[in-house]
Every structure is written in C-alpha cells, then in structure tokens.
Image (tube, rainbow, N blue to C red):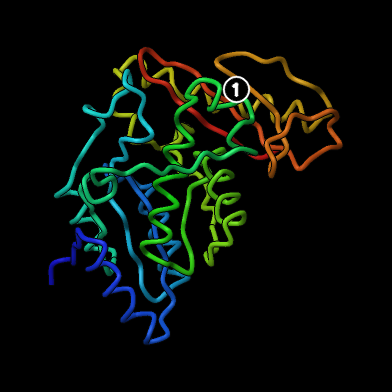
Amino acid sequence: MPIRVVRTVSALRRAVMRWRVAGERIALVPTMGALHAGHLALVRAARRRARRVVVSIFVNPAQFAPHEDLASYPRSWDTDLAALSDMGVDLVWAPAVAAMYPPGFATRIVPEGPATAGLEDKFRPHFFAGVATVVGKLLIQCAPDLAMFGEKDYQQLKVVTRLANDLDLPVKIVAVATVREPDGLALSSRNGYLSASERAAAPALYRVLKDCADKIARGELTARVLDYLEARHADTLAPLSSLADGPIRLLVAARIGKTRLIDNIAV
C-alpha cells in the first residue's frame, strides 16, 4: 500500500489518537525533506524504539533569512516518499506553509541558553527562533513519545532538548550519531550545492575537527579559526574555562565556496 500522507492537523491528530488509544509508542522524525542516509538513520532509530513512526516533511520558512536559500533548498518529494515507504514509515506529516503559519499567526518561541551560545546564532541570529517555533508546533501536533534529532546539527539538538524540558513537553528527545561519507564529510542536504572541487575540499572540515580533538584530549588548547572552531561544554554549550570543565564538544563552521557547512565531534 502507498504510504499515508496527511496535510491537516485534524487528520494528523485522528491518526495519532488511534495509536495512542491502542497503547502504541510513537516516534517523530522531523525533516525538511531532500532525504539522505542521515535522515534514514533517524528513521531506523525511531523504528527500533517505537511501534509507530511519523516523519514530517516541511521546509520551514521561519528559519531562513531573506538572503538565504529557501527557494532553492533541495526538494525531492517522490524520492523521499519511496524511501520512507520502503522503511515502513506509518505516516508522513506534510503540511503546507498556510497550515503551519495561517493568516494572523503571531506567536513564536525565542529560545535562549544553548541558542545564544555564540556559535550558529552569531552567524544566523534568526535561525533558532524559527527552529524552536516549528519544532514546538510539531511536537504539540504529533504528540510523540520520542523525537529523533541528529548530532550533526548539534547546537540545534541542544536547543530542542532544552525547549522540550523547559516547556514540560511529554517527549524524549533522542540524539542520533552523525552519518558521514567514507571521507568523513557529514551528510547534509546542502552538500549537493558543492562543486566537484569544493566537494573534494570539504572533508578538510572533519580532519580539522579530528586533529583538534586529539590535541585537546592530550591537554592542549586550540586556536579559533574558520567561522568558528570552538570547544564547548557538551550539554550547555558554554565556553570552557579549563579542560576539566567537560564533557567537551568541538564544533566548527566554514564556507566551502558559496556553501556553508557545519560539523561537530565529541572529545
């Protein structure tokens, strides 16, 4: 049977309510589509933990600044549905923009804490309010027991975890390890923007992370380069006053050609 796609909150809630009444555990995998192996790893992690899996596909305009790539953001609807169907996903939640942000919409979530750590927020000050608002809506709409987020977008993971805790949302945020290409490049929908020469250069980002992590593990501090290369507390994203402050997460961002890539690893 073709995978079920719902586009209204009422239809979504009817489906979820039937599972809830049956006592079935529900997991949500939020995505913006253009699915790759990293997204599918989130789906597999959800399937291991829950009887029912919902995948949302929504390119969220609230997290794009006017100069950013909303119009050109990659979309691959038919391929995405085929992949999710093959994985046995129970439901795809694919609202239109008007369903998520109807006329008169006037409320947003403005996170602090990990969202104001001076990392991605320094370069994209609009971003985490857009993420927090849409994720808050998705968690309320889908009412999952679990929601899966990749460690690749590490600051986002921490923002979402803090959001769920602070608003007493009855959901467990599950972190899933970054999926990488054989040469170390973290999978991202934006990797498709890279030219051949840029793609060849991009794995240097991971090599820098690995080298710096090794130095920190040996007790050395590392200089800040690129957009940022920061060793931060792995839970709060606060700056470190000493190497004993851990646990430590090393985060990096850089531009390869016109494409901005981010990555992170544990130390």
Residue farthest bottom in this picture: 22
In the image shown, does 124 or 195 lie closer to the viewer? Answer: 124
Q: Residue at x 41, y 44 (%)?
A: 107
Q: Secondary structure at mark 1?
A: helix
Q: Amino acid at mark 1?
A: Val
Quadrant that contains the N terminus: bottom left
Residue at 37%, 49% in the rendered image: 39
Q: Is residue 174 above or below residue 116?
A: below
Position of 20 with respect to 73 (left or right) is right
Which quarter of the rendering shows the C terminus? top right
Answer left or right for 54 relative to 146. left
Residue at the (59%, 44%) spot, across then down: 158
Q: Position of residue 70 (x, y in %)?
A: 27, 29
Residue 167 vs residue 211, the one in the foreground: 167
Q: Which is more toward the observer, 148 or 43?
A: 148
Q: Which residue is mark 1?
A: 208
Asked where in the image residue 212 lies, by quadrant, the reply is top right
Residue at 36% of width from left, 24% of height from top? Answer: 65
Work out whether 254 lies above or below 162: above
